[in-house]
Image (cartoon, rainbow, N blue to C red):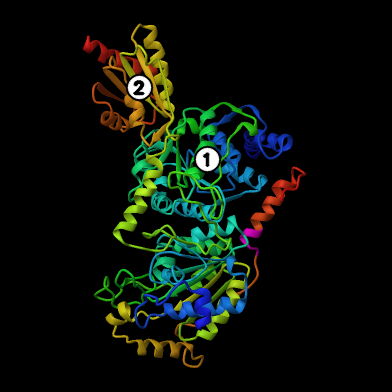
């Protein structure tokens, strides 16, 4: 791990709270790209605003692009189209990716652009102090739902699948090995890849809902047990299929437009 | 029947494009054309080396997107129609950091949506070009009518401290020339540049003369690792995928990109970014005529400068000595140049614009020793020559 740290991280320690899942995801991601052995210059890590967006920026020693709240996927789309060779990974959260940035999420999935979106779902807006999010379970307590959340949460995997994503998975930070494997698959997959990672937030969400970090881990353990997880939140890879990728389509259009003139460019 | 009518319209509309494609290859051949202002702007972008456009349909800027969706793939570029203007402006910033010269085009409502991203572009010093074809607001307003109401939004619309470059064309020819200039300035200064057109110029067909490509000066940003450096504290720009391990962030940062909230670091960054523009001498362009013997002067910009100039000529024929000033650069505001242009005999200054009086406030700030009269035209209408003449005559008689 010392070696990996030197190779891929700008500096440590990170500033995540005790019990936060961000460190585990950072760890898993570093291991995944180390095992993939792709050119590290080809990685571009884009993030928005929120706790999860601090995973790549400033810690990862790769090209990192810390953008605006909710807009990471839109920035990533521009960068990926302008330079198709980049391996673009978007780190986002539930508020960032599904709340303010929900529109960009579904449209990127619809285009099937070759991005890898790692969405950390901690059920709340952690950075601003634990407000109700589009993924907060019904009736749970947050700083802006003191009487219990009146809304119902998103099922993000179903949403993204319906929008047209070609790789969709959900894991918890309790399953690092499966998560690393899935990250590698998602990065190599040609098309829109989406991994929802359930992550604990004991500081903001757990505190108000009497969930200690131990309760979180037990809950994730229960979810990850195939026998004990009947009607609850399913985990695993839900979609893995081939479909025309957006950047390739754009390059075909270029050839079509240039072919008409009978000249070949590039 | 209906389909055929539509089809024939479409063919007429697109026929010039098809002609360039068949006859002239990538760039429109030098020569004289009769085209829309929007298309002149789009063709200017291609001449300037734009390789990615991201946009969202909005009247009266849609033609720029339509034209580029056809032309950019021909010229080895990419056209993206995004889900909204927020995503459009985000995508061009992403593309710019990936090495492209990128542009978007919109009108007032879309420009409002882009402001947060524009602020990000100022802080991360990202070269992008935003074309705003102004229409009559507020809100949906008179969507198909022209106006000049984004004079202040183009300067102060986004949050935070920054200085901006805003250009204002008043003909189809200038839509072409100034689009190229906007790209050049954005690359030279490593900042977003706004081309503030209006619906009248965007939707006007007029002569466009395309000069020989070799006579057009095209600028490129200095990249990280290049031996040359620019003056004026303009930093070389890194590019994703080239091994620089860039740290790009909208948070307060050091020159390296590392986040740092220290008061002295952030204030130094802001002052450096602002000084790039406030210390520059080659940004401001201004047109002035008949000022030597002028007793009064009419100031205008954009489409309203055309009837204003007509009024100047007509008034001079009547023997009233009126001068003419047109801002080609709206921001940075030409404070010093404007003061120098004012001679002591000028005691009336008329500011003609298609809003409720915006540029007139800046003129009031700069010119102290003359009476300043705001000539405004609302309702999505270009002010008529007669209305300007009437206003000038009324004021001048008053004085006499």
Which numbered disc covers residue B184? 1
Q: Disc 2 is attached to a residue of which chain?
A: B
Q: Position of residue B64 (x, y in %)?
A: 54, 40
Instruction: Check the image and report above or below for B139 versus A233.
Output: above
Q: Position of residue B23 (x, y in %)?
A: 73, 34
Which residue is outermost to the front?
Answer: B227
Residue in the foreground of this view, choosing between A112 and B121: B121
Residue A259 visible in the shown view: yes
Report crowding for label 1: few under 14, some 14 to 19, many 20 or more residues within 10 A (C-alpha).
many
Q: Are marks 2 and 1 in contact (CB under 8 Å)?
A: no
Residue B202 left/right relative to A216 = right
Callout 2 secondary element = helix
Give the number of marks: 2
Residue in the foreground of this view, choosing between A160 and B278: B278
The magenta span reads A244-248
Instruction: Check the image and report above or below for A127 versus B388.
Output: below
Q: Label 2 vs label 1: CA separation?
A: 27 Å
Residue A236 visible in the shown view: no
- Quadrant of the drawing holding the C terminus of chain B: top left
By secondary structure, the bulk of the magenta-drawn segment is best described as helix
Q: Where is mark 2, residue-wise? A: B341
Q: Is residue A247 within the magenta segment?
A: yes
Residue B148 left/right relative to A1 = left
Q: Is residue B149 within the magenta segment?
A: no
User: Residue at the spot x=67%, y=34% of the render?
Assistant: B15
Q: Disc 1 is attached to a residue of which chain?
A: B
Instruction: Check the image and report above or below for B255 versus B156.
Output: below
């Amino acid at each position: 791990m010392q070696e990996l740290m030197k190779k891929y991280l700008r500096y440590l320690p990170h500033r995540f709270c005790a019990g936060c899942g961000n460190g585990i995801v950072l760890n898993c991601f570093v291991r995944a790209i180390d095992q993939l052995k792709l050119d590290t210059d080809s990685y571009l890590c884009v993030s928005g605003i929120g706790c999860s967006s601090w995973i790549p920026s400033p810690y990862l020693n790769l090209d990192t692009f810390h953008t605006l709240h909710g807009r990471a996927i839109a920035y990533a789309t521009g960068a990926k189209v302008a330079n198709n060779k980049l391996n673009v990974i978007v780190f986002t959260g539930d508020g960032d990716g599904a709340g303010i940035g929900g529109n960009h999420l579904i449209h990127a999935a619809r285009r099937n652009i070759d991005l890898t979106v790692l969405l950390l779902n901690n059920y709340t807006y952690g950075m601003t102090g634990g407000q109700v999010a589009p993924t907060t379970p019904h009736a749970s307590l947050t700083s802006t739902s003191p009487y219990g959340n009146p809304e119902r949460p998103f099922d993000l995997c179903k949403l993204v699948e319906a929008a047209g994503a070609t790789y969709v998975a959900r894991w918890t930070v309790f399953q690092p090995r499966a998560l690393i494997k899935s990250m590698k698959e998602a990065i190599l997959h040609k098309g829109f890849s989406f991994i929802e990672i359930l992550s604990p937030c004991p500081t903001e969400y757990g505190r108000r809902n009497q969930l200690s970090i131990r309760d979180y881990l037990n809950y994730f353990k229960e979810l990850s047990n195939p026998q004990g997880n009947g009607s609850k939140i399913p985990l695993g890879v839900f979609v893995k299929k081939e479909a025309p990728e957006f950047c390739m389509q754009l390059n075909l259009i270029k050839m079509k437009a240039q072919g008409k003139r009978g000249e070949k460019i590039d | 029947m209906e389909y055929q009518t539509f089809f024939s319209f479409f063919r007429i509309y697109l026929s010039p494009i098809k002609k360039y494609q068949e006859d002239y290859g990538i760039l429109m051949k030098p020569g004289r054309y009769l085209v829309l202002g929007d298309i002149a702007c789009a063709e200017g972008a291609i001449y300037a080396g734009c390789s990615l456009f991201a946009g969202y349909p909005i009247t009266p800027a849609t033609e720029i997107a339509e034209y580029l969706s056809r032309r950019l793939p021909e010229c080895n570029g990419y056209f993206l129609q995004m889900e909204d203007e927020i995503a459009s402006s985000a995508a061009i910033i992403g593309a710019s950091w990936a090495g492209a010269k990128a542009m978007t085009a919109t009108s007032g409502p879309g420009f409002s949506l882009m402001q947060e991203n524009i602020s990000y572009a100022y802080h991360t010093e990202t070269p992008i070009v935003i074309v705003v074809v102004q229409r009559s607001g507020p809100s949906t307003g008179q969507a198909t009518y022209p106006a000049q109401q984004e004079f202040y939004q183009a300067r102060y619309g986004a949050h935070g401290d920054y200085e901006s470059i805003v250009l204002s064309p008043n003909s189809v020819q200038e839509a072409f020339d100034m689009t190229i200039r906007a790209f050049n300035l954005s690359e030279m200064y490593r900042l977003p540049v706004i081309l503030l057109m209006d619906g009248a110029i965007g939707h006007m067909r007029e002569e466009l003369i395309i000069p020989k490509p070799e006579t057009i000066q095209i600028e490129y940003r200095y990249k990280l690792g290049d031996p040359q450096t620019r003056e004026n504290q303009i930093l070389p720009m890194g590019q994703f995928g080239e091994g620089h391990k860039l740290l790009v962030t909208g948070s307060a940062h050091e020159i390296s990109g590392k986040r740092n909230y220290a008061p002295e670091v952030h204030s130094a960054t802001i002052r450096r970014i602002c000084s790039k523009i406030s210390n520059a001498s080659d940004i401001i362009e201004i047109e002035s005529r008949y000022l030597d013997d002028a007793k009064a002067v009419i100031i205008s910009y954009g489409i309203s400068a055309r009837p204003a100039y007509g009024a100047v000529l007509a008034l001079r024929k009547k023997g009233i000595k009126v001068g003419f000033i047109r801002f080609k650069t709206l921001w940075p505001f030409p404070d010093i140049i404007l003061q120098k242009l004012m001679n002591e005999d000028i005691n009336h200054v008329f500011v003609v614009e298609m809003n409720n009086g915006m540029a007139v406030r800046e003129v009031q700030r700069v010119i102290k020793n003359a009476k300043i009269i705001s000539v405004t035209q609302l309702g999505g209408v270009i002010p008529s020559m007669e209305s300007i003449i009437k206003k000038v005559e009324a004021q001048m008689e008053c004085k006499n």
